[in-house]
Image (spheres, grey):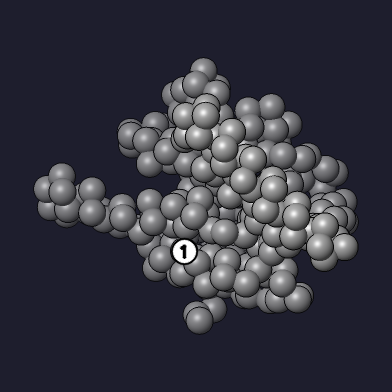
Amino acid sequence: MSDNFIVTRDGDVTTILANKGEDGNRFSDAMAVEMAGLLDAESASARLIVFKGAGANFCTGRTGGMIQGDAYDFRNAFEPVFACYDSFRRCKAPVVGIVQGKALGFGCSLASLCDVTIAADNATFALPETSHGIMPTAAMSALIDRVGRKALMNIAYTATEFSAEDARMFGIVSQVVPAAQLDEATTAFVAKMKKMPKPVALAVKEFTMNGMGLSNNAMLAFAQNLHSVVNSYSKLKS
């Protein structure tokens, strides 16, 4: 593993720390690939993955130079970004993001992709792509099932930073806490998750990520199956 991330484990709770605080935790393509690999690997045994950024900011975007070639070259060059996005969605363990400072562009996308996002009250978010003349659909693909249509279009078109409380209202953030209490709120959330039977923690994400794409009858059957299997297991273990 490179020095881009610091991974620590407390039993079956994994913490992944983006370790480029001096650069605002901006992600290179290599970091995006590495992050996806970490999520895939840790989801095999973790009940919860905590994702944080070192330093003053959660993530201020991506790094990368100009892409040469035709449209297909440009399209293929973004595969690490979309693969990283998909790793959050396919991760079996729930991912809780802890956001301080700025979450811009790619950082805003990652904050939205976390299953639960706890933000400091002084954190700010934005999709600044259109202000640079860039089509923002890559980032929008991360937000599209989190944020309502009107809010998403406003975020994309205005490209301006908005508050943590606005991010909570839009659906990007789950909880907003005073900045001085961010670590305390994280510890409290992890403690609650540790008390929960692991199959319950995993099944909640499985249902949330897959239920919406099913027909109503299939969704109800999926819910009933998970409910009976997981609760039967939890009852036997209690």
Q: Give SS at disc 1.
A: helix
Please give the residue where the numbered disc 1 appears in the rendered image: 36
- Where's residue 220, x and y in %? 59, 33
The residue lying toward the viewer, choosing from 42 and 226, is 226
Whether residue 143 can be seen here? yes
Q: Is residue 164 above or below residue 13?
A: above
| Image quadrant in which the C terminus is located | bottom right
Residue type at mark 1 is: Ala
The residue lying toward the viewer, choosing from 204 and 58, is 204
Please identify the residue farthest to the left as the structure is shown. 70
- Where's residue 115, x and y in %? 63, 47
The residue lying toward the viewer, choosing from 35 and 232, is 232
Residue drawn 12% across the image and 52% down it: 69
Residue drawn 77% across the image and 40% down it: 175
Whether residue 180 can be seen here? no
Crowding at dot 1, Cα within 10 Å, few <14 / some 14-19 / many 20+, comes out as many
Residue drawn 81% across the image and 63% down it: 236
Q: Quadrant of residue 207?
A: top right
- Where's residue 147, x and y in %? 56, 29
Residue drawn 76% across the image and 75% down it: 10
Q: Is residue 187 above or below residue 41?
A: above
